[in-house]
Amino acid sequence: MPGATGYEVFGRLVASPEIAGSGRTDVRAVDAFGQRSLAARSEERPGDDGWRRAVGGWLDDFDDTFLERRYHLSGRPGCVNPSSGSGGRLVIDMPCGNDTAVLRARTLLQLNDSDELGRVAVVTDAAGPRGKLVLDLVPGTPDRVGPIPPADAIRVVVDDSVASGTRGAGVLHRFEVVLTRNGVRVLQDGAQVATSPAVPKWREASVLIAVTPPPSYPGRVEIDAVGITGPLQPLPEVTETPIVAGTLRVLEPEEEAPGIGVARTPLRATPSARLRATVRLGDGGDPNGLVAQLGSARLPLRPVVSGWSGAQDSELTLVGDVPAELLGPAGPDALTPFVLRMPGASQAQVVESYLEVPGRSPVKLEAAPGEPAPVLPVMTAEFVRVTPNDATLVITLDAAHARSVAPIAGFEVYVDSGHVATLPMPGGAGGRHELEISLRGSHNVEVRLRPEDPGRQTDSVWLELSRSSR
C-alpha cells in the first residue's frame, strides 16, 4: 500500500513490513491517518540451517539455561537482565535505557589452515532499526573493550548504516563474520553486506557479542544461536561472584579509601580464586600499576589482552590472583576496604568487578517475562518554512524502532496555549504531516500526541517561533 506507515498483523500494530511470527496470517497496511487497507495473505520466509555446517565448530542454541557456564555477561546490574525465552532463546531485557550487554563466550575462536580461516555466526534481532550489534574478536579474554578495541582485534559493527531498511524490529537475522586469508567478509542471512582487508595475526581469540537495543522502553534483545569455528574444547569451569568496590572511582595509590568492603564468603571454601575487573580509563594514569586492595592485601592486576589502548574512555579488563592468606575458613567475615588503585588514576572508573572460583556455576536463568508492552511512536516537530504571515509545521511520528506499536488517536496543535488544530488518525502507527499555520510575530507552539488508550500518558513537543512582526 503506497504511503503505508505501519501494518496490522498477528493482532498487533507494527511499523515494519518484516514481521516475526509463525504461520500465515492476514496483513493490513495502515496509512498516516490510521486507515486500513484490504487484507492480504502473508508469506513465510523459509528456514535455512546450512550455515551450521559452515561453522563446523561449537554451536549454542541456548537450550541450556546455565548461561554462566558458557559465557560471561557484562552489563549494569538491574539494567541488563538475562532470561530464557521459549523455544531456546536468550532474552536480555534492558529497562533502564542507554545500555549495552556484552557476552564473552568461554569457547575460543580457533583458526584453521584452509582458505577460510574461521567463522563466527550470531542469530539475533539486535541490529534492528536503531539497534546495534558489535562483534569483537580479541586475543586474550577481555570482558569488554569499549569504543577503542586492542590493536590486533577485529571489530564488526552492524547497525542502520549496514543494509539499512532490511531488518524489522524484533526480527531475527543471522550475521556471520568470515575470516579468510584475503580479509574479512560480513554476511547477513548469507548475503555479503561488508568486507575488510584485515587478516588476523593470531590463531585464537575471544568472541565478544555486544548488543544494544533501540531506544524504546523497555529495551529487549533476543539471541537465538551462536556458532564459533574450532575444535570442541572443554569449557573452563568457574563460578562468578560479583563484588562492588567501595567507590567506582579508581583511587591514587595512597589516597584515603571509604570504609566499605565485601563479604569473604566466596573465598572460604575454595583453594584458589581470581579477581577480574574492567576499568574505563580516564585521560591519564598507568594501568600497568593497577592494584586491587582487599582489606590489607594489595593484588597486582595484569591486563588480559595485549596491544590495548590507553586512550580516554577505552575499557581494559585485568585479572589478579587472590593471595592464599585470604582463602579458607580462617579470617575475617569481610574484607574492608575493597577499592582499585592506580598511579595517576585521573578519573578512571571501575565498570565491573567479580571473583572467579573453580567449580561449575549453579546459576540458572529464569524464564523470560512476557513481551514488552507496545510503545508510542517517537514524535518530533519542527518549522521548515517561515514567512512573515505563516509557517509550515512538520510533525513526524516514527515507530520504526518499536517491536509493537501502541496505536495513536492523533495529535493537537496549540499556539500560546490556545487550541488551533486537531489531526485525527484513529488506530494510527505514525507518519509525517505538514500543517500551514497563519501566524505573525513570535509565538510558543505545542504539539500534543494523543494515544488511543486514554490511560496512557500523552507526549508533547514545545517549539518557539521567534521573528519580528511585519
Image: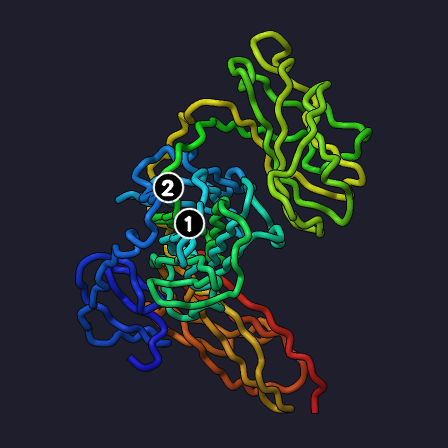
Q: Is residue 382 visible?
A: yes
Whether 175 is drawn above or below 71: the answer is below
Q: Which residue is mark 1?
A: 112
Under mark 2, the amino acid is Pro
Q: Give the percent coordinates (x, y) of residue 6.
A: 34, 70
Q: Give the percent coordinates (x, y) of residue 466.
A: 68, 80
Q: Is residue 216 visible?
A: no
Marks 1 and 2, Cα distance to the nearest angstrom?
10 Å
Under mark 1, the amino acid is Asn
> Which comes sooner in the sequence, label 1 or label 2?
1
Q: Which residue is mark 2?
A: 231
Mark 1 lies on a secondary structure that is loop
Q: Quadrant of the N terminus?
A: bottom left
**In-image side of 195 versus 60 (left or right):** right
Mark 2 lies on a secondary structure that is loop
Q: Quadrant of the C terminus?
A: bottom right
Whether 277 is drawn above or below 329: the answer is below
